[in-house]
Structures are given as structure tokens and as C-alpha cells.
Amino acid sequence: MCRQVKNQSAPCNCDPPIDVSSDELYKLGILTQYIPVVDSGLIDKMCDERGYKYRDELIISREKMPNYDEEIKKYFEEHMHIDEEVRYILDGSCYFDVRNREDKWVRIAVEPGDAIILPPGIFHRFTPDHRDYIQMLRLFKEQQEWLGYNRNEMAKVTSVREQYLKDYIGK
């Protein structure tokens, strides 16, 4: 991903582009899977296998979201969660940016049928692409208030962040 983001909804590729394999993402604790949108039975199976008991549907678009530009800026602030972030894309497309082992950004494009699981403690950010539309399922193990913790000194020392660094970064 390019160093400076001028337009967060653009692909922001390096010049020349650098591809990141699913194996490299896996080493960062990120799981990706393609599940055809027409086959909701496979989503139910994944939920059963991974213990996701709760789900909701979120649509992010200029038409559906008041204060769209302000909200998108919040999503694009670097943050982490204390639980897995699980998203299954139903329609539209977006980007998840994550930090690699060298603390550089990696941009992951997701489209309909893509499921992505980010581990607890990984710093990341999110943005719709140039179409400004995404419809997704959010999957959770527990019913809870979903909070993000922005990257700052307090977030860096949480036990969740420390465990992520130990498990995936080797620190």
C-alpha cells in the first residue's frame, strides 16, 4: 500500500504493486474465505464451527448513513478491538487496512462473498471503496457493545494487544 493516502477509497497500491498472499495474512492472524452469497448455509456452518452466536447486518452508504463523511473518517482511524472482527460481505466492496510485521500498511480488498476475520489486538482501519456502498454481516461470539480502541499508548499496553504481538509478531 502506498505510504501516503490521498484518497482513502482508492486502491492505494504501491508502485510497483506488492501482492500479499493469504498465507502472509494468515501469519498475521487474518483469516479470509470466499463463501458464495447465495449459499447462506455455509455462513451458518462457519458460525457453528467458530462459535458465532450473534449477527447483524450493516449498510454503509451515503443514502443510509447520516453524517456519512464523518462516520467514514472514524472507521478510517487506526484502532483495535478486544474480540475478533468478523465481516461477511453481501454487496458492495471495501478495504480493510492492517499492519504487517514491519508495521507497514497492507490493504485488503473485500467484495461480495468474502469473509474476513481479524484477530483481537490487530491495529487496522476500514473504508468503503469509491462506490461508497457496502452491505455486510457482522458476526459475534457474544452479544456486546462493539468498541474500537484507537492506537495510542493505552491501547498498546492492553493484554489483548500484548497477546496479539506474542502470537503473530513475535514480540
Image (tube, rainbow, N blue to C red):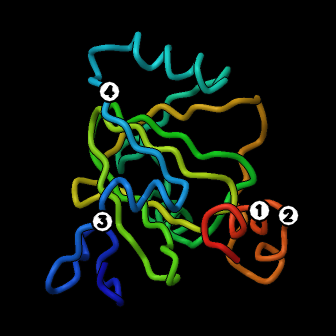
Would you say 131 lies left or right of 39 here?
left
Q: Check disc 1: other Cα within 10 Å, few if <14, some if 14-19, many if 20+.
A: some
Location of mark 4 (residue): 35
Mark earlier in primary sequence (2, 3): 3
Location of mark 2 (residue): 159
Q: Check disc 2: other Cα within 10 Å, few if <14, some if 14-19, many if 20+.
A: few
Location of mark 3 (residue): 20
Would you say 101 lies left or right of 8 here?
right
Percent x, y of residue 129: 28, 58
- Residue 48 has which mark? none
Percent x, y of residue 125: 51, 65
**Residues at marks 3 and 4, CA–CA distance in whole angstroms:** 20 Å
Location of mark 1 (residue): 163
**Residues at marks 2 and 4, CA–CA distance in whole angstroms:** 33 Å
Type of amino acid at the residue the image marks with label 3 = Val
Image marks 2 and 3: residues in contact by CB distance under 8 Å: no
**x 48%, y 74%: residue:** 100
**Residues at marks 4 and 1, CA–CA distance in whole angstroms:** 29 Å
Image marks 1 and 2: residues in contact by CB distance under 8 Å: yes
